[in-house]
Image (cartoon, rainbow, N blue to C red):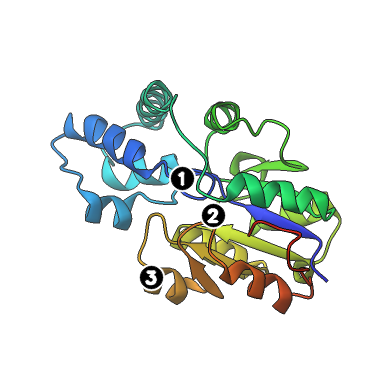
Amino acid sequence: MLTALLFDLDGTLANTDPLHLRTWQEILGQYGITVDAVFYKKHISGRLNPDIVRDLLPQLSLEEGLRLADRKEARFRELGTELQPLPGLLELLDWASQHQLSRALVTNAPRENAHFMLGVLGLEYAFTTVVLAEEATAGKPDPAPYQLALSRLGIMPGQALAFEDSQAGIRAAVAADIATVGIASTHEPQVLQKAGAMQVIPDFTDPKLVEIFAALGLEITAGTNSL
């Protein structure tokens, strides 16, 4: 029986990729690296900053890489004050609360970014728990962040449903044995399906959500939800 919904942050709660793309273009452009949408999806999307910097700028020391990542995220926060929740998200969270489903945020984002985004989106109190990759033994695509979320919620994988927009995130949730829905805000649906998503939707207004919940043992009475 479904008892919890687990959400990624970037690209899932809000379409942040255009801002992340812009900030990486600014930062990496200083090193002669051209970042377009294809490069971003292949080398950056869904990954941890230390891994991104190590792969793209191996000449930097660990300390230099950390400072660069900090500058990048500070710039993101400067640009992100007008972010909006993905369509249907607020209604889904309200519906989940009404149906007594636990809600967890599971993200690779730095702590400061996570708190910033939750504030901008008005979701400071929307989640039962928030799991940061830095709190787990490894970040996505490792299943550790999702396993930590399950532990904190006191549930088994079969009681949860995850929402993810990236290949790394989907692989992490699936590796934790959690049924996962892909959000096609960043990648093409077929890419997310190949990564292991059980279903792919463009946002949280898609009527396929009703079918997904029913398949996981949660029946929805007509007229009681806005999904």
Tag 3 or tag 1, which sits nearer the N-term?
A: 1
Tag 2 or tag 1, which sits nearer the N-term?
A: 1
Of circles 2 and 3, which is in front?
A: 3
Query: At 42% from the left edge and 40% from the top edge, which residue is drawn?
Result: 49
Q: Classify the position of the N terminus by image quarter.
A: bottom right
Where is residue 193 shown, x and y percent of the image?
A: 46, 74
Task: Say left or right for 115 vs 190.
Answer: right
Where is residue 8 shown, x and y percent of the image?
A: 57, 50
Residue on which the image places disc 1: 48
SS state under label 1: loop
Q: Nearer the viewer, residue 223 or 34?
A: 223
Residue on which the image places disc 3: 191
Q: For the residue marked with disc 1, what is the amino acid?
A: Leu
Gap between marks 1 and 2 measured at Cα: 8 Å
Q: Are marks 1 and 2 in contact (CB under 8 Å)?
A: yes
Q: Classify the position of the C terminus by image quarter.
A: bottom right
Q: Are marks 2 and 3 in contact (CB under 8 Å)?
A: no
Q: Outermost residue, bottom direction?
A: 215
Q: For the residue marked with disc 3, what is the amino acid?
A: Val
Q: Are marks 1 and 3 in contact (CB under 8 Å)?
A: no
SS state under label 3: helix
